[in-house]
Amino acid sequence: MEPFIGTSLTVGALALETAQEATTVDYDAISTLWVLMAAFLVFFMQAGFGMVEAGLIRAKNAGNVLMKNLLDFSFAALGFYMFGYAIMYGTEGLIVGTSGWFMMDVPLAVGGLPLPAFWLFQAVFAGTAATIVSGAAAERTRFVSYLAYSFLMCSFVYPVVGHWVWGGGWLSRLNFHDFAGSTVVHAVGGITALVIAWLLGPRIGRFNPDGSSRVIGGHNLPLVTIGVFILWFGWYGFNAGSTLGMSEPEVVARVAMNTTLAAAVGALAAMATAWIKFGKPDLALSLNGALGGLVGITAPCAVVSDGTAIYIGLVAGVLVIFGVDWLNRWRIDDPVGAFPVHGICGIWGTLAVGIFGQQALGAPFDGLFYGGGLGPLGIQALGLVACLAFTAVAMIIIFRAIDSLIGLRVSKDTELKGLDIEEHGMESYSGFQIFTTE
């Protein structure tokens, strides 16, 4: 079985077995096992996101953000089952798929995989895109409004971008390359995080009257550290699992190696940059640097060398630090750094394909540094702009509609007391006085 996402092959090229034909298909047992295990790893990333986000905010809101991590995946799975899969993979239209609603009348096999295995792998990707946003919106977003966002995002917005790139849409026909989702998952989630952080406005007390930034520290850095290691572990399923098979074990191994190197160097680069810039090696920023390296290598992980992976991780780690500084200058409050990590580094990783990609390693073109000229970089840039512009406009409309109908931000009193006690009637750390009056 050939890689699906990494080679930009369409669903039609891989999986137009009819229901009758599928009954005679010999499923690839090893590839099915690999894809299922990879999907389980990506699902476990939800726990990592939950730990990171809960640890980087105040204790009085930890339960609320964990509830959002639980429910956004629940709504993502349901929405992707009902509408998302059909839009993303139903038919090979230029813009959207138009068949397969509620998973009815879809092929029973996809490139040697049973359809449920392929669906699960795609559903956990959709859930990842959705959950990126909860950290950026933390400590001030109404719970019911966030649930509405999760369902709409994974049902109608994320699948459109996925169709363009992985489902036979117009970008796949231009050879736009995003192996495992620097754009489709991370930049889409990152730009959505930026949109909601901008629309909500900063948390009370986050910026001083003169516009200077005031740090609101997270309550549990050990929890954040555990979360990052869970995410790093899950990323092997995210990237290496995107081969969708074991027919080319050398590609799987290269992806895993590149993923490791980029994350490691991202952490080192972020630590060094923070040390130089702020005088101290900051733990939270170093952890986000590792995540930035992982996001950056996600698009090019299969089509670049290990030396290039080191460079991609280095740049990503530096970008995380300056991305946080940029948000502060614009008085945009992103409590966990979702946009610097997923948005900015997702953009960098996608462009890196057009710079460093190698046809010899499976890329659809040679990048700028390998004699491919500016054309491949232009295709990657075009795809980025299209995906991010569509997502930003769609999410602004959705968030505005939610705000008009049910309200997006909690009241000042709720924000001050904490969303745990006000929205859920409970405390994450029972027996402690965890809310403040400022």
Image: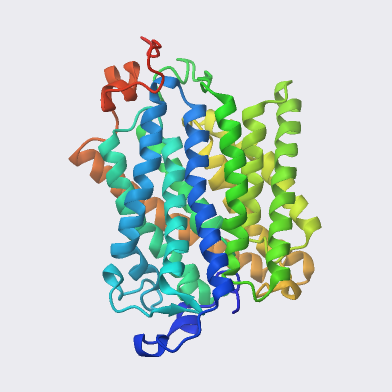
Placement of 222 over or under 8, stated as above or below: above
The answer to which image quadrant residue 64 occupies is: top left
Using the image, determine if residue 252 lies above or below residue 135: below
- Quick check: can you spot residue 160? yes
In this rendering, position of residue 6 left or right of residue 435: right
Q: Residue furthest right?
A: 307
* Count of numbered marks: 0
Q: Can residue 373 be seen in this view?
A: no
Between residue 157 and residue 298, name the one nearer to us.
Answer: 298
Q: Which of 256 and 146 is in front in this view?
A: 256
**Residue 358 at x, y = what percent?**
74, 70
Task: Please report the residue visible at 58 percent of the width from the left and 46 percent of the height from the top.
Answer: 344
The quadrant of the picture occupied by the N terminus is bottom right
The residue lying at 61 percent from left, 66 percent from top is 378
Q: Where is residue 379 in the image (x, y as percent from the top left)?
A: 59, 68
Q: Quadrant of the C terminus?
A: top left
Does 384 sit above or below residue 206? Answer: below
Q: Which of 232 and 210 is in front in this view?
A: 232
Q: In this view, does 177 lie to the left or right of 68?
A: right
Q: Which residue is drawn at 66% across and 39% down?
A: 289
State the image coordinates of residue 432 (x, y, percent, origin top left): 40, 11
Looking at the rendering, which quadrant does residue 241 occupy?
Answer: bottom right
How was the colour assigned to the protein in this rendering?
rainbow
Residue 179 x/y as whole percent: 59, 65
* In this rendering, position of residue 324 left or right of residue 315: left
- Can you tell which quarter of the image residue 355 is in? bottom right
